[in-house]
Amino acid sequence: MTLTDSIAAVEAAWSRAAREIGADPASVIAATNGKRPIDNLAHFKPHLRPNEFAVPMDAFERSILFYADASRGG
């Protein structure tokens, strides 16, 4: 079994999301720590309806994978 520390990738993804909404990345990272991404999405993009969460959630999850791959040199 391999364990992967994804903290850096998740923080990079939240930093990117923060810049997209015009918010301070450090504040967004602090606010999202320990909370489910779907709950954070609802908080930071309140204009979205629950049935509109799938696309931005997928994009966010893909950005985590992108940053995780980048940190491994992939």
Image (cartoon, helix red, strand yellow):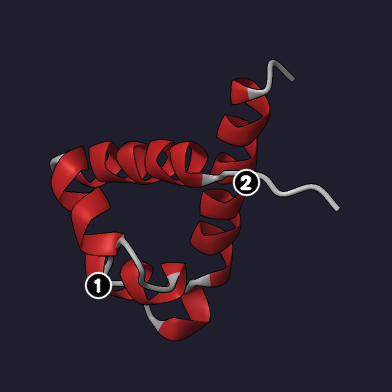
- Residue 24 lies in what quarter of the image? top left
Residue flagged by tag 2: what amino acid is it? Arg
Instruction: Give the residue displayed 36% in from the left and 46% down from the top.
Output: 14
Q: Secondary structure at mark 2?
A: helix
The quarter of the image holding the C terminus is: top right
Q: Which residue is mark 1?
A: 43
Q: Residue 14 got which mark?
A: none
Tell me whether circle 2 and circle 1 mark residues in contact (CB < 8 Å). Answer: no
Q: Nearer the viewer, residue 27 or 50?
A: 27
Position of 51 relative to 17 (above/below): below
- Left or right placement of residue 30 versus residue 39 in this view: left
Residue 41 on image: x %, y %: 36, 67
Residue 38 vs 20, above or below: the answer is below
- Residue drawn at the location 62% of the way across and 22% of the way down: 70
Q: Answer with left or right where residue 28 lies relative to residue 61.
A: left
Q: What residue would you read off at disc 2?
A: 62
Q: Tell me the quarter of the picture where residue 58 sits.
A: bottom right
Q: Position of residue 59 (x, y in %)?
A: 56, 50
| Element type where label 1 sits in the image | helix
Q: Is residue 31 above or below residue 39?
A: above
